[in-house]
Amino acid sequence: MCSCTVVRVSTTLTPVRVPPVRPAPRRRTRVLALPEARWALASTVAFLAALALDLGGLPWWAYGPPYAVAYVTGGWEPALEGLRALRGRSLDVDLLMIVAALGAAAIGQVRDGALLIVIFATSGALEALATARTADSVRGLLDLAPSMATRVTEHGEEPVPTSELTMGDVLLIRPGERIGADGRVLEGASEADQATITGEPLPVTKGPGDEVFAGTLNGTGVLRVCVERDPADSVIARIVTLVEEASRTKAPTQLFIEKVEQRYALGIVMATLAVFGVPLLFGAGLTDALLRAMTFMIVASPCAVVLATMPPLLSAIANAGRHGVLVKSAVAMERLGEVDAVALDKTGTLTEGTPEVSAVRPMPGSGLTPDALLALAAAAEHPSEHPLGRAVVRAARERGLRVADARDFAAVPGRGVTAVVGGRVIGVGRAGDPVTGSVDLGPDADAAGVPGTEDGDTVVLVTGDGVPLGTLALTDRLRPHAPVTTAALTALTGTAPVLLTGDNARAAARVAEATGLVDVGADLLPEGKVDAVRQLQDAGRKVLFVGDGVNDAPALAAAHSGIAMGRAGSDLALETADAVVVRDELATVPSVVRLSRAARRLVVQNLVIAGTFITGLVLWDLLGHLPLPLGVAGHEGSTVLVGLNGLRLLRESAWRSGQVPFQGTQG
C-alpha cells in the first residue's frame, strides 16, 4: 500500500466544469511531413508537367528540363544512399533502380526512365509512411501520459511537470483529466477509462485503496492519488521503452534475408550483364537488349522480399504493447508463434498469489458464530504484516465486522501471533505451536511447511486463553480467466498445459482440477521446473513457460519462450522473460501467441507474394516482351502491397480476433 498520507489543504476545492471525456488524440504522421513524400510529390509533379509537354508535341528543350527535375528530385536520395553503401562494399538494391533509370535515359527512353524514378520514389514514400505509422502506434502511447499534474502540498495545490513527480507525492485528479502517474487512490470516488492500458472496454470504478495508472482517463469524480512509481517506471513508460527496444531488433527470418540479400544483388548484376550480352551475341539490337536487361534488373530486385518480415512483426509488437503485453524483441515475437507446448506456474500465475479466507469453522462448544470467530482472529492479526494475517483482516472488513482493539501483540515468525482482545489471549497460528497449543489438526497439518493444509487450503487454528475456538481456511484465489485461458492454450497447441509448482501436491491438484489440467508437477524446486521444461523440449516440443517469481527465472530462461506476469513479478523474472504481461491479465497470453502466429503467417504471405511477382515478371521479361513501365509498376506495386499487408496487424481487430472470452469469475 502507499506509504504517504493525505495532505489536507485549508482552501475549498473550486468547483470545476466537467469536461467531456474524450480519448487522447492519436498522433498520426502527416504524409507531407515525411521528406520522402515531399520529394516523391515534387518528382511526380515535374514528371506530369514534362509528360504533358512531351505528348503535346513540343520540342525537347521544353519538356527536357521538367524530366530532369523529376530524375533529380525523385532519385538523388536513393542514389546517395546507394553510393554510400557501395563505399562500404555493400550493394544496395536502390542503386540498381537508379542505374536502370539512367540507362533508359542514355538510350533515349527518357520518359520510361522518369516513370521508373517517379514510381520508385512514390514506393519509397509509401514505405516510409508505413514505417512512420508503425512508430506512431508506439509514440502515441506517450500522448496518453499528461505532461503536467496537480500536486497537493501543505500550502495548497501546485502544477508540476509529471517528470518531476516522486514516490509519495499526492496528486489531485479532476474530472476528465488524465492521471499523471501510477499510484493508489487515497480519497474520492470516480471511474477510470483504462482501455489504453488494460484493454478493458468499460470504465473501472475507483475508490480508496484502488490502483490507478498513468495515462488513464478519470471520469466524473475527483480523486486524490498517492504516487507509487517513478514516472520513468510507470506502466505506460515501460510499454513505450520495451516496444521501442523491440523495434530495433531483427527476427531470424529478417537476418537470414539480409544475409542472402547481398549475394542475391550481386547475382542480379551478373544475370543482368548476361541478359544484355547474350542477345547481342545473337544479333539483337543494342536498344532492345539494354531495355530488356534494365527491365530484368528492376523486376528481379528483392525489395519486396526485404520488406516482407519486419512490418508484420513490428506491427504485432506495437499492437501487443497497446494491450499491456510487452514483447521485448522481434526475435521474441517470432518465437512466440512457434510454441506447441505450455508450462504454467501456479502461485501468482494461475492464481492471484494473494491468500483469502475460504472457510471459517468454529469449534463445537466454543459458543462462537463464524463472524465472531473471524472478528476475534482479525483483531489479533490486525497489527501483523504477514500475508495470511492481512487476508484475515481483509475478510473481516469485507463482511462488515467490527475489529476490536488489541494489545500486547506478539508475533513468532513462521508460527503465528498472539494478542489480548477483550481480556482474552487470542492466538492465531499453526496447530501444535506455542501460540495455539497442542491441538492436532490431522496428519497433513505440516505437509507443506505452512500452518496446516486441508484439501489444498492453508488452515490456521484460533485459540482463546489456550482453548481451541475454531479454524480458518485460507486459499490462494484462482485468477478469473484461468480456466478459459488454459482451454484456449490447449486449443492453440493441441495439448493441455503442464502445471509446474513448488507448492504441495494437494494445492496443485486443486488448481489443476479447477483449470482442467491433468499433467501436474508439485513440490518442485527451481531446478525441478527447469528439468520438466527440458524433458518436454527433449521430446521435440517448443515450450512456452509462464511464471512470475524468482524461482521461475531459470525455467523462463530454459524455455523456447517465456512470459512473465508483470504486476507482481520479480525483477529477475521480468528481465529473463521474452514478454511481460503488465497488468497480470492472464487471458492475454493466448492472445499474444495468436497474434505472433498471425504475424508469422503474414511473413509467409509476404514472401509468397514477393516471390510470385519476381518470378512472374522475370519470366515475362526473359520469355516475352515486358514493357519497362509495366515492369516498374509490378515491382514497386508488390513492394507496397507487402508493406501494407504487414501493417494489418496494427488494427484493433487483429488483437480482438485472438481475445479469450470472459466467462465469469472462477475459483
Image (tube, rainbow, N blue to C red):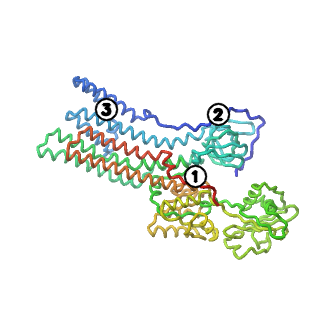
**Which residue corresponds to mark 1?**
582
Q: Is residue 641 left or right of residue 165?
A: left
- Label 3 or label 1, whichever lies nearer to me, is 1
**Which residue corresponds to mark 3?**
72
Residue 88, position in %: x, y? 33, 46
In which image quadrant can residue 405 be found?
A: bottom right
Which mark, by number, is residue 19?
2
Residue 387, position in %: x, y? 71, 60
- What residue is shown at x 46% (from left), y 67% (from top)? 537
Query: What whole-number distance in Å separates the C-alpha atoms at marks 2 and 3?
Result: 52 Å
Pointer 2 with pointer 3, Cβ within 8 A: no
Provide the secondary structure element on which disc 3 rests: helix
Crowdedness of circle 3 by 10 Å Cα count: few (<14), some, many (20+)? some
Crowdedness of circle 1 by 10 Å Cα count: few (<14), some, many (20+)? many
Taking depth in this image into account, of 370 and 251 the one nearest to the observer is: 370
First-in-chain label (3 vs 1): 3
Q: Amino acid at mark 3?
A: Val
Taking depth in this image into account, of 508 and 325 the one nearest to the observer is: 508
Q: Quadrant of the C terminus?
A: bottom right
Q: Residue furthest left?
A: 283
Q: Is residue 384 above or below residue 627?
A: below
Query: What whole-number distance in Å separates the C-alpha atoms at marks 3 and 1?
Result: 49 Å
First-in-chain label (2 vs 3): 2
Which mark, by number, is residue 357?
none
Query: What whole-number distance in Å separates the C-alpha atoms at marks 1 and 2?
Result: 30 Å
Taking depth in this image into account, of 400 and 95 the one nearest to the observer is: 400
